[in-house]
Image (cartoon, rainbow, N blue to C red):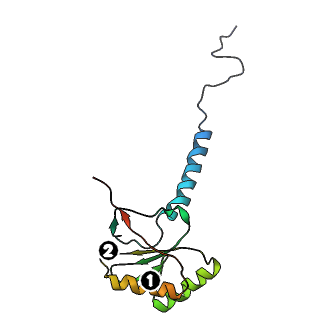
Amino acid sequence: MGMSSGPKGGIKNEINITPLVDVVLVLLIIFMVVTPMLQRGKSVTLPKSKSTENEKKDADPLILSVTAERQVFLQNDLLDDAGLEAALRRELQKKPDRRVLLKGDEKLPYGEVRRVMNVARKAGARGIHLGVEELKAP
């Protein structure tokens, strides 16, 4: 009579890590999809404001960015005034009620922001919203 070490059938006590790997891969895919959506438009230093508008009204605005060097970007495309007007007009023909979010660097003179707003209005933008950074209460 031989002595057997363990229950009949040879079942081993091992941890099954397959569900853990599945969960980690799903989380990785979610972060890969969400991260580019968080940082849209060009990086500019926004002016500070105590009150900010609720951004939930339109989840997908057109991002218009003006850098401190006075370069104008629609989403991530560098454009001059004529190109900006044409590109905005194309986008607004697809969805006329789409908001335009203007992110102007805080170092820009007011006249420069005003010029870009006029170009957007000529292109048919109805609502142009200025991007600001909310001041945190101390």
**Which residue appears farthest toward the top when viewing the image?**
1
Three-letter code, disc 2: Glu
Which residue is depicted at the point 53% across and 71% down? 61
Q: Which mark is residue 28?
A: none
Distance between the alpha carbons at the discs numbered 2 and 1? 15 Å
**In the rendered structure, which disc, 2 or 1, sits on the residue that comes first in sequence?**
2
Three-letter code, disc 1: Met
Eyeballing the image, is 92 above or below 83?
above
Helix, strand or loop at mark 1 = helix
Helix, strand or loop at mark 2 = loop
Q: Residues within 10 Å of mark 2 (few under 14, many from 20)?
A: some
Q: Which mark is residue 117?
A: 1
Q: Nearer the viewer, mark 2 or mark 1?
A: 1
Which residue is depicted at the point 47% across and 87% down? 119
Eyeballing the image, is 57 above or below 99?
above
Eyeballing the image, is 3 above or below 28?
above
- The residue carrying mark 2 is 106
**Which residue appears farthest toward the right when viewing the image?**
9
Q: Quadrant of the N terminus?
A: top right
In the rendered image, residue 69, in percent from the top left (x then y), is placed at 33, 82
Q: Is label 2 in contact with label 1 (beta carbons under 8 Å)?
A: no
